[in-house]
Amino acid sequence: MKYRQFIPEKLWFVVVGLAGLIAGSVLITSFNGTTYNSLLCTSRVADSNPTSTQLLAILHYATSRVVPQQSISEIRVSFDVLQSLSPCNFLVFGLGHDSLMWSSFNPRGTTLFLEEDPKWVQTVLKDAPNLHAHTVKYRTHLSEADDLIKSYKSEPNCLPDKAFLNGNTQCKLALTGLPDEVYDKEWDLIMIDAPRGYFAEAPGRMGAIFSAAVMARNRKGSGVTHVFLHDMDRRVEKMFAEEFLCKKYRVKAVGRLWHFEIPPAANVSSAIGGSSFC
Ligand SMILES: C[S@@+](CC[C@H](N)C(=O)[O-])C[C@H]1O[C@@H](n2cnc3c(N)ncnc32)[C@H](O)[C@@H]1O
């Protein structure tokens, strides 16, 4: 108890969470095959060992005083969804002190990070080479946010029924030129905690929010796309979330994190259609 006082609360949460995952894995593998098969499906038997990313995460968070910026209750929102969906496809905007944690919450799934700053990619990958990250160039600045939201409807390729991402240079909000993997996969979870959006020249999150909405609406598989958006105390994040991710799809608001569950457009029988994402 005395020792715990010296560990930041967030670090404690991460270490306990990861230790739980590993303890669970060890417990499960200690069952004989018959008993185990009666408890869980066979396909998960072979997958119960901790991954190298999980082990690296324990080592990292147990020995680092730098912890993720999201609060425990905010982290818990996506943690719970990952617990139910993993292994799954998890797209994360931004590399940070939380990256190893996100990746280890999705063992044997695909967790892909998109980062604006190539130097920061190198810095993070030096300590965590297991992470799967790409550098992304954004075509916007935060200072353009108001103009973009006023004018996007005059560009047909930005409209909900026509919008696409790969090569859609006419629509400035579409993230073009991402690695093919981003366009080819259907993302079960999308975490938007980047790019930076706290000064005028920063890219802002307008393109990431718009593109997450397009990916979610174009989903062909079953189920919804979970979109998590951080820094919801900021005007631009709120304005773009309400325009593209829609209040009606918001299922949680915890601290500065909003969680949306967006159904594929094909499943929505809406009288609105036309020019509205919501
Ligand atoms: C708002 S931060 C989110 C950080 C993340 N949630 C975390 O817990 O670390 C997003 C962006 O800030 C930048 N960034 C974060 N930490 C940084 C650092 N220590 N040095 C340089 N850039 C950093 C990166 O470009 C990153 O994509």
Image (cartoon, rainbow, N blue to C red):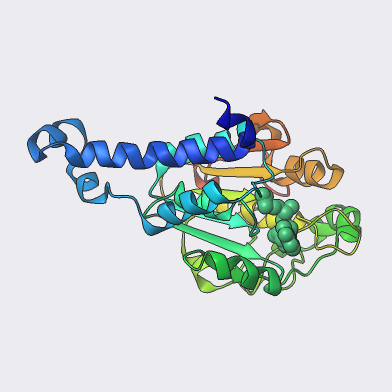
Q: Quadrant of ligand 1?
A: bottom right
168 w.r.t. 229: above or below:
below
177 with respect to 15 (left or right): right
30 w.r.t. 95: above or below:
above
Q: Where does the image place residue 12, in percent across and percent down from the top left? A: 56, 36
Q: Residue at x 78, y 63 (%)?
A: 155
166 w.r.t. 39: above or below:
below
Q: Nearer the viewer, residue 114 or 177?
A: 114
Q: Nearer the viewer, residue 174 or 89?
A: 89
Q: Quadrant of the C terminus?
A: top right
Q: Nearer the viewer, residue 220 or 273?
A: 220
Q: Where does the image place residue 1, in percent across and percent down from the top left? A: 54, 24
Quarter where residue 165 is shown:
bottom right
234 with respect to 258 (left or right): right
Q: Where does the image place residue 168, in percent across and percent down from the top left? A: 67, 71
Q: Residue at x 45, y 56 (%)?
A: 56
Q: Where does the image place residue 92, in percent across and percent down from the top left? A: 59, 55
- Name, please, the residue furthest toward the left: 34
Quarter where residue 270 is shown:
top right
Residue 121 visible, this orientation = yes
270 with respect to 112 (left or right): right
Q: Residue at x 84, y 47 (%)?
A: 236
